[in-house]
Each structure stands twice: as C-alpha cells, then as structure tokens.
Image (cartoon, rainbow, N blue to C red):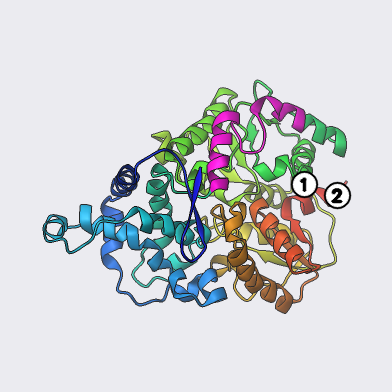
C-alpha cells in the first residue's frame, strides 16, 4: 500500500502495483460492468434539484457542497456518459466528456468511502427515485478493482480472505464460542452436524460484544430450539459488500448459505448487524445464482417472533427509551415495527427521535466509515446530529439493534464525553427473560 498526499494535505490510499493507465482502466471496467438498464435509468434521471443534500448527515453536519450525495457520483457519471450512455460514441469522438483521471479517482475516495455510509437517506429524498446509495455501492466495485480503497478496508479484505472473518481465524471460532459460554454461564452449541437454526455473527461479537454470543444461546436454549453456531459459516457482516470486492462478497454469501444447507437448517439467523442484513437478506440470491433454500432473518425479527408468539416471556422494565434505527435494517430493509414490538413486550415506553423509522439519521459509521480512521473528523461531526436528537427526546435509555451502530455511537459518546450508554436490543431481552 502507498499513500498519495495532495496539496491540501489529504492522503489517499493506493494499493497494488499498477500503472496509472492500468489503474484507471480497471476502475472504468468495474464501473461499466455496473451500467445495466436500472443504473442507466438512474444516471439519466437526475434533474440537479439538490434535494438529496439535506438528506445527507455529512452535508448537514458540515455544509460542504462536495458532500451532496449526487456529487459523489460524478466520476461514475462521467464513465457512464463516455462508455455506456446513448451518445457515448459521439462524446468520445468529440472529446466532450473527458476521461476520468487517476488523480480524480484517488481524490474521490474521500467522497464515496469517507463521506458515505450507504445509508440510503438520499435515495428516499430523491423525487426522481434515483437509488443514489446503490449507485455509490456499485461505484465502489470499480474503485476496488483499481486498488483505490481505504487502507483499513483493504486490510479487512485480506484478513477475511485468509481467515474467513476480519476478526478471527475460523479454526479459533469454536474456542471463542465456548469461552463466551463459560464466562457467562450458558450452554453453547457449536459445529453441531444438524440443526434447524444456523446462527451467524458479526466481527464486533467476537471482540467488543462477546456477551451477545451467550445471549443468543440463552434465548434459544430457553425456547428449546435446535440451533448451532458453525465454524464453516459464521461470518455474516461481509466486508466485500462494503468495500466493493464482489468476488469476496459472493464467497462469503455462499459460505453461510452452504453451511446452512449442509446442516439441514431451515432458518439462517443474522446477527445484530445492518450490513449483514443487506448482504444476506437482499443480495444473497444475486450472488448465489438462484433462490435461497433457507429462510434468512435478522436477530431483531427472530426476537419479534419469539416475544409475539409467547415462546419467551419477559420481565417488564419501568423505563423510557429511544431507538436508533439502523439504516440497512430499517430504511433499506423495512424492519421498522419489529424492534418496537420487542421494546413494547419489555414494557418500555418508546420516545421516538425527531427523525425515526425510515427517516432516521444514520449513526455515521456504516458502509465501513467507522473502520476508516481517515474519516474520523467528519464522522464525529455527523454524530452530533444524533446526539442532539437523543437529548431532545429525553428518554432514560438509548437502544439499537446493530453492533456497528453501537460501536460508532459509543465512540462518538466517548469523544464528546457524553454519558449516554448505547444498549443492545438483544442483550435487553436476554437480561430480562422471565422464569
């Protein structure tokens, strides 16, 4: 890896040994591959109204015009008009649309990796129905091919390819599960040859949030379910989904689905992770190449079914709470009612944030941003938007259902010496199981 520093003093990460021409061509090839009918319709539909700007937490927090969401697609748009648009041959012949330069692509990292969490709020605001977040995610495919992604995301990519997870080698997974069981006094199931439920994890649960591993077991054991974790398919967060490595995204998608099929699981339970839901629930069939033969649900949906069916009973909590809606789970995934159902069964009175449900403001760390230290200054500015909403709501507790959001919000709280604890919905349920 090398880093190039501009006159503005901003370093951009450059990976691989490629000439500038090869790097540019790799990016263009990656972009053009994404120019199907839907992407083309979106690229032709923008009327430059600017409504997406006020939907973006980074733009609102900074007021910087460059962070207008549609602006983040400029090189992608140039590539489209030059290589795939209806007038592309004429534009190339006349030189009307310039070829995208490597320098522009390097600088573009700041916009699509540092200043975009793929949250989709801009998509919701667009009057033309342009899925800006999806286009930015597709643009990352070309940037990955060109080796132009943040160093930490590249490291996580390499680690996942070597270990099967960015957090731990697959051969150590069973030990981590069993150690969590011993620490929290819960019987754990790992690598069972047959089970009805395959439970997957996100990296945070293998490091900061190991209690979640035991909490899942505690709930499933109480329900008398046939379930297991499995070393052959445990990592659901899918770094390829975030950094543009489509080959890795396909590999990680296949791994958890194939493991579920191997053990005869009827349901694949995703962890408290928004991007895991986007990758496995909504994109798995694309990369798997056909219908998924198992049911895929988020942990929040599992908890909703458990409490609504009466299979678990909960002690009541005499408290109010505000819920942070994870973007990939709620806005992009539609799972809005489930967490509120669960909080209701806990006896919690929900005090909604000013922007909630599908309009919720992003935590500021999704899309790999929290792992990209270069983005810390802008991420902390965006965090202040969420902090103000939480304080204005005035609830006793602050809850979410995504480990990545939880980490991002906790880091923000620490940075600003804010004493609000960010709690997990899963852990709240596990801690309040009724006898």
Residue linked to disc 1: 312
Q: Position of residue 115 (x, y in %)?
A: 51, 63
Residue linked to disc 2: 434
Which SS type dominates the magenta stretch? helix
The segment highlighted magenta reads 151-176
The verdict on residue 400 being magenta is no
Residue found at x 58% / y 64%:
362
Q: Position of residue 102 (x, y in %)?
A: 35, 53
Seen in the picture, residue 273 relative to 385 is either above or below; the reply is above
Q: Position of residue 129 (x, y in %)?
A: 36, 66
SS at badge 2 = loop
Q: In which quarter of the view is residue 214 placed? A: top right
Tally the numbered discs. Answer: 2
Asked whether 40 or 365 is in front, the reply is: 365
Circles 2 and 1: CB distance less than 8 Å?
A: yes
Asked whether 137 or 155 is in front, the reply is: 155
């Amino acid at each position: 890896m090398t880093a190039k520093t501009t006159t503005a003093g901003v370093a951009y990460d450059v990976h691989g040994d490629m000439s500038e021409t090869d790097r540019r061509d790799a990016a263009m090839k990656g972009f053009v591959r994404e120019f199907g009918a839907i992407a083309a319709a979106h690229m032709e539909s923008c009327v430059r109204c600017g409504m997406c700007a006020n939907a973006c937490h980074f733009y609102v927090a900074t007021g910087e015009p460059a962070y207008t969401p549609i602006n983040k697609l400029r090189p992608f748009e140039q590539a489209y008009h030059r290589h795939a648009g209806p007038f592309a041959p004429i534009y190339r012949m006349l030189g009307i649309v310039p070829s995208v330069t490597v320098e522009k692509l390097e600088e573009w990292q700041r916009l699509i990796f540092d200043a975009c969490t793929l949250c989709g709020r801009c998509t919701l605001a667009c009057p033309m129905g342009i899925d800006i977040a999806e286009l930015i995610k597709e643009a990352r495919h070309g940037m990955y091919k060109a080796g132009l992604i943040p160093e930490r995301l590249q490291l996580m990519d390499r680690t996942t390819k070597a270990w099967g997870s960015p957090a731990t080698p697959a051969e150590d997974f069973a030990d981590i599960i069993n150690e969590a069981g011993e620490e929290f006094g819960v019987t754990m199931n790992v690598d069972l040859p047959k089970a009805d439920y395959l439970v997957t994890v996100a990296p945070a649960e293998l490091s900061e949030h190991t209690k979640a591993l035991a909490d899942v077991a505690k709930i499933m054991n109480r329900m008398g379910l046939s379930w297991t974790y499995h070393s052959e398919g445990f990592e659901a967060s899918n770094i390829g989904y975030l950094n543009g490595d489509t080959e890795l995204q396909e590999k990680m998608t296949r791994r958890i689905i194939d493991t579920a099929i191997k053990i005869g699981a009827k349901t694949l339970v995703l962890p408290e992770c928004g991007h895991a839901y986007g990758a496995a629930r909504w994109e798995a069939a694309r990369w798997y190449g056909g219908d998924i033969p198992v049911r895929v649900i988020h942990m929040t949906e599992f908890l909703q079914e458990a409490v609504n069916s009466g299979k678990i009973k909960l002690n009541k909590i005499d408290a109010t709470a505000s819920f942070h809606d994870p973007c990939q789970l709620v806005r992009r995934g539609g799972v809005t009612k489930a967490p509120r159902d669960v909080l209701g069964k806990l006896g919690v009175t929900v005090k909604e944030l000013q922007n909630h449900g599908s309009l919720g403001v992003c935590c500021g760390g999704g899309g790999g941003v929290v792992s990209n230290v270069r983005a810390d200054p802008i991420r902390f500015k965006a965090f202040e938007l969420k902090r103000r909403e939480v304080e204005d709501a005035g609830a006793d507790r602050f809850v979410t259902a995504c480990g990545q959001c939880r980490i991002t919000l906790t880091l923000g709280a620490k940075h600003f010496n804010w004493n609000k604890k960010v709690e997990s919905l899963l852990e709240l349920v596990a801690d309040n199981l009724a006898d």
